[in-house]
Amino acid sequence: MPAVRRAIVLAIATLMLVPVAAHAAPVTLATVGDFASPVYVTAPLGDTARVFVVEKGGTIQVLHGAGRGTFLDITSKVNSTDNERGLLSMAFALDYSTSGLFYVY
């Protein structure tokens, strides 16, 4: 199952970073890492250097080039014991680059 999760995160991250064009070259996939129950991938508006991976257990990993780090760890506040529970998503404020505001669900 981890390989399936990795493939899903990889596909989503690739689609977010590749502009859609009518005659675009074929998309190639690259492994960006292993994650514990990834549920969402996003990036702030205009930020093409970083990708944020939300993990159900309560962490958000940030990928920057070949580097990876923990952006947020709220595992102590998240109940992820059931299928429909856990950290499910995040969104960046439109002015994130100046305000630093983001939201988690």
Image (cartoon, grey):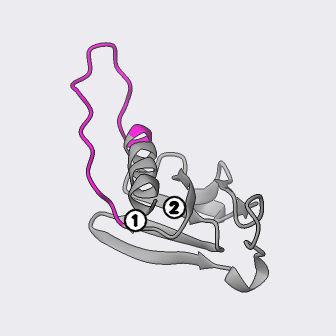
> Helix, strand, or loop for circle 2?
strand
Q: Quadrant of residue 39?
A: bottom right
Front tag of 2 and 1: 2
Does 30 sit above or below residue 16? below
Q: Residues within 10 Å of mark 1 (few under 14, many from 20)?
A: some
- Give the residue number, with chain letter if any, for mark 1: 63
Q: Is residue 104 left or right of residue 2?
A: right
Report x, y in % for residue 27.
27, 33
Residue hosting label 2:
53
Q: Main secondary structure of the magenta part?
A: loop
Quarter placement of the C terminus = bottom right
Instruction: Please state the extent of the stretch shown in magenta in the rendering.
Output: 15-33
Identity of the amino acid at label 1?
Leu
As shown in the figure, which amino acid type bears the numbered disc 2? Val
Q: Is residue 79 magenta?
A: no
Q: Residue at x 37, y 31 (%)?
A: 19
Does the residue at mark 2 contact the one at mark 1 (Cβ under 8 Å)? Answer: yes
